[in-house]
Amino acid sequence: MKILVIGSGGREHALVWKLAQSPRVTKLYCAPGNAGISQQATCVPIAVDDLTGLQKFAEDERIDLTVVGPEAPLALGIADLFRRNKLKVFGPTKNAARIESSKAFAKDLMIRQQIPTAESRTFESVSAAIQYLDSRPVPIVVKADGLAQGKGVVVAHTHEEAKEAVLNMLERHAFGEAGQRVIIEECIQGEEITLMAFADGKTVIPMLAAQDHKRVGDGDTGPNTGGMGAYAPAPLAIPALRYAIMREVLYPAIEGLARVGSPFFGVIYAGVMVKDGVPYVLEFNARFGDPETQVVLPLLKTDLVDVLEAVVEHRLEQLDIEWSEEAAVCVVMSSGGYPGKYPTGVPIAGLPDSISSDSVPVFHAGTAWKDDQIVTSGGRVLGVTAVSSNLAQARSKAYDTVQTINFDGQYYRNDIASRVLP
Ligand code: AMP
Ligand code: GLY
């Protein structure tokens, strides 16, 4: 089978690496990919939002299956376009992807389906938003309605901070169109967990639960990022909790989407805050999480091609998905300054040879080739991942590898997985 993966981050490197292990795959392409991905797939310079360029490539190369990594092409309707043209594609339609591309749509779905979530209101007017804020206790959460690369959420500890966030979004247009509407939401204190599941419109099969580390600083301090590290399986997600998330969140969401004529095919991602055993949904995503995928896929024992194909062909119920008993930890190494401004083009030294190692490679995110050398090209640069028989060992293996890698201005959190480990 010829497979095309769309995207250029650590998540897509993990997808490419996993797909490369399948005996069913004869040729792998990635658009546009990155330096690490280019060692395992043929990278083609087509942007993720160039839908017609991607369609033409898939037709010309007779791609058997296209796997969409990021949210942007899904929100633009890549899955609709490919399906209309009889191209097999793994990912939800534009309408179903609204669970991620519009927080207001997701909230309506949750209310209709009685999915536990924080109480919230949506505003387009600054004065109405501020009047509402004044009537609510802090901490309080302000969210841009649309896609903002994980950065459109402010957990405000004072009314001043919350008002600033509202002004930034509605008046100063800090997130462009994504911030034309804001959601103001009750702050829920608890333990955060990610549960992703494969869904074929009807059947839903969960993956292992993972935990992301969204804040930039140790001890969960500083601004939110796209994710600074992850581990799986999350010990908090005992079977009873996974079952509760399936029953109270994922099944009702999939059923609710089917009911409004937008059946969901792909990966549904529930980011939940667990408080007193109840999983409150903070966000849905319509795709694999990043960096959760970097720790979940290394633990998947079933051939990923079989799983993706079963979703695309709506026969997930016939599939048994098997997982390893091991644990995985991913430490993200980022450019100094991220999630704010950062330099690029910085040479990276000490990268292990990803082709010669048969264990999990260092997943590349913001990397590029420059004159035969791998340099930084983004905020999140590498996802150093290790698998071992338990979380503590996986963590020390990952940090051992981090020590061997070096680039000017490099930054990483020192406490990935530490909350659940001594
Ligand atoms: P989101 O992109 O909606 O997942 O939000 C990013 C992060 O902000 C989440 O991972 C949480 O850490 C935090 N967050 C979002 N909504 C809430 C909430 N209602 N209560 C507490 N924290 C939240
Ligand atoms: N890890 C958060 C996300 O993928 O959106």
Image: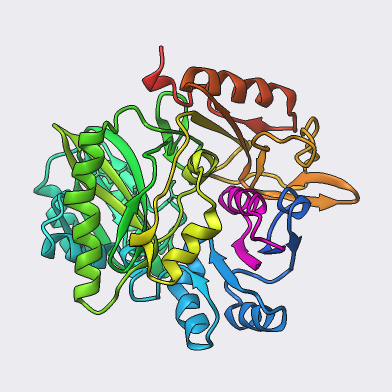
Front in this rendered view, residue 281 or 42 = 42
- Please state the horizontal and vertical placement of residue 10, each as a whole percent of the image: 60, 47
* Placement of 295 over or under 202, stated as above or below: above
- Please state the horizontal and vertical placement of residue 195, each as a whole percent of the image: 34, 45
- Left or right: where 324 falls relative to 419: right
Q: Quadrant of the C terminus?
A: top left
Q: Residue at x 50, y 48 (%)?
A: 302
Q: Residue at x 22, y 57 (%)?
A: 251
- Number of callouts in the render? 0
* Placement of 311 over or under 165, stated as above or below: below
Question: Can see residue 108?
Answer: yes
Q: Residue at x 53, y 54 (%)?
A: 304
Question: Can see residue 291?
Answer: no
- Left or right: where 119 falls relative to 59: left
The colour style of the image is rainbow
Q: Is residue 21 magenta?
A: yes
- Left or right: where 385 falls relative to 144: right
Quarter of the view holding residue 407: top right
Which residue is farthest bottom? 85
Q: Quadrant of the N terminus?
A: bottom right
Q: Is residue 161 magenta?
A: no
Front in this rendered view, residue 250 or 303 = 303
Magenta segment boundaries in residue numbering = 1-26
